[in-house]
Image (cartoon, rainbow, N blue to C red):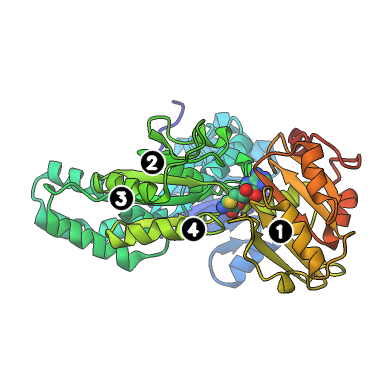
Amino acid sequence: MKHLPIFISIRNKPCVVIGGGLVATRKVSSLLDSGAHITVVSPVITQEIQQHVATGKLQHHSRVFLDSDLNDAYLVFAATNSREINRHIGKLAEAKHQLVNIADDPDNCNFVLPSVLDRSPVVIAVSTGGASPVLARQLRMQLEAMIPSACGRLAGITEEYRKKVKSFFPKQTQRKQFWENALKGPVSELVYAGQEASARLHLDEMLEQGLETSPMGEVYLVGAGPGDPDLLTFKAVRLMQQADVMVYDRLVSQPILDMANPEAERLYVGKQKDDHAVPQQKINDLLVEKAKQGKRVLRLKGGDPFIFGRGGEEIETLTEHGVPFQVVPAVTAASGCAAYAGIPLTHRDHAQSVTFATGHLKDGTINLNWEQLTQANHTLVFYMGLSGISEISKQLQLHGMSANMPAALIEKGTTRNQRVHIATLATLPEKVIESGVSAPTLTIIGEVVKLHDKLNWYQPERHVKETDFSLHNT
Ligand code: SAH
């Protein structure tokens, strides 16, 4: 390790920046965040530094550098555009045992500024020892995506409870156990979801219960989106990676399952070869049972859990049993498929509203308000509509929709196997048979389907069969 990473307090300490260009400006802004007493020495300064001078945040000497500028400085930044002057400053500072950073000259610095992820009081610093500041910034941005934005608030609440926890648990090992349980359980997630009052209540309950009672687990009802793993939310990925048990069904694609905690117990509740899915009530009970064992249970759902996902039923059972849970929304099949097929669901000229409906056939019929669905300038999206496609086509025509209304069947939308089949309202049933389309498939009906040819830039041919989404990323 070339440098020892330390976090030092420089509040109100004299720090001097020699130079007034862009590099100096960056150093100044890092310093400002830490409350240092800053002096900039340079005949010319950027507008940003001028503003800081005007608002009294720093001092400025408008002249060239003098050796005496280093006098009692705690940190020295040499950021002039002359390498010689910078080196001269470096040598002077070294001789005085000061900490000095020289712009663009890592070998002659005795400290470097890391790239910083600030979730105060949590601060993560990334350094490449000056080898590649760009790489350090990129790594920091990756961390930015992984570390919840409310991580600092969680640290704040932890601090607030330190004394209280100490009074309940005199031994250090007990306190460690308590915090491990608390931070692994619902407390962190409550804070991340902005529910700090509930997090405090939960901590108080945990203190009252002591360490003997096994902590209650929780259920994460997480939307996995329509298929492309890149469409997952940050929150979904985080919860997938910390779950102890994973309950999933057929609509969740393999690349997404691969992203979950490899150690998690995996329970498949979708349709088996004999075509029998685990009944909903059994799934609800399973979630409760696992959570009561103290497990963090991930219930992964295709698309969004609250759109034809029976998410509502699952959380009802959880509430009845006092199991904490959270619901994570996701891209639903309608928006995912529409975007990846170049069919905007609304459009100034073609559709001012859109309906998501279920095309699920029950006793040979679909219970929908067909009159409402056939209004003009409206887009219809049918989930689960394959088996009921003849009924959908028939009813919409009976209620006045033109037989020529454009329609699209989007099969395995947003995945590498996406196929888009274009038809009209009248030809939809025959298109389903002739194309051999299989589930999951989404049906979009409306004028907006006409835009598919024009907007589907990565599928230049009409009625194209395969879509290679790697094109998307080039
Ligand atoms: N909760 C899910 C919908 C579940 S209902 C969501 O928000 O997307 C299941 C139906 O969703 C399927 O029958 C199909 O119509 C649609 N669907 C889900 N994923 C799909 C995909 N990748 N491509 C096309 N249709 C999909």
The image quadrant of residue 186 is bottom left
SS of the residue under disc 4:
helix
Badge 1 local density, few (<14 within 10 Å), some, or many (20+)? many
Q: Quadrant of residue 134?
A: top right
> How far is mark 3 from mark 4, CA to CA?
46 Å
Which residue matches tag 4? Answer: 33
Residue positioned 68% across, 52% down in the render: 388
Q: Left or right: 117 with respect to 41?
A: left
Residue contact at pointers 2 and 3, CB within 8 angstroms: no
Is any atom of residue 38 visible in this view?
A: yes
Percent x, y for residue 68? 52, 50
Residue 381 marker = 1
From the viewer's perspective, is residue 217 above or below residue 358?
above
Contact check, label 3 and label 4, Cβ < 8 Å = no
Q: Which mark is residue 288?
A: 3
Regarding mark 2 in the picture, which secondary structure is present there? loop
x 11%, y 47%: residue: 212
Disc 4 residue: CB within 8 Å of ligand 1:
no
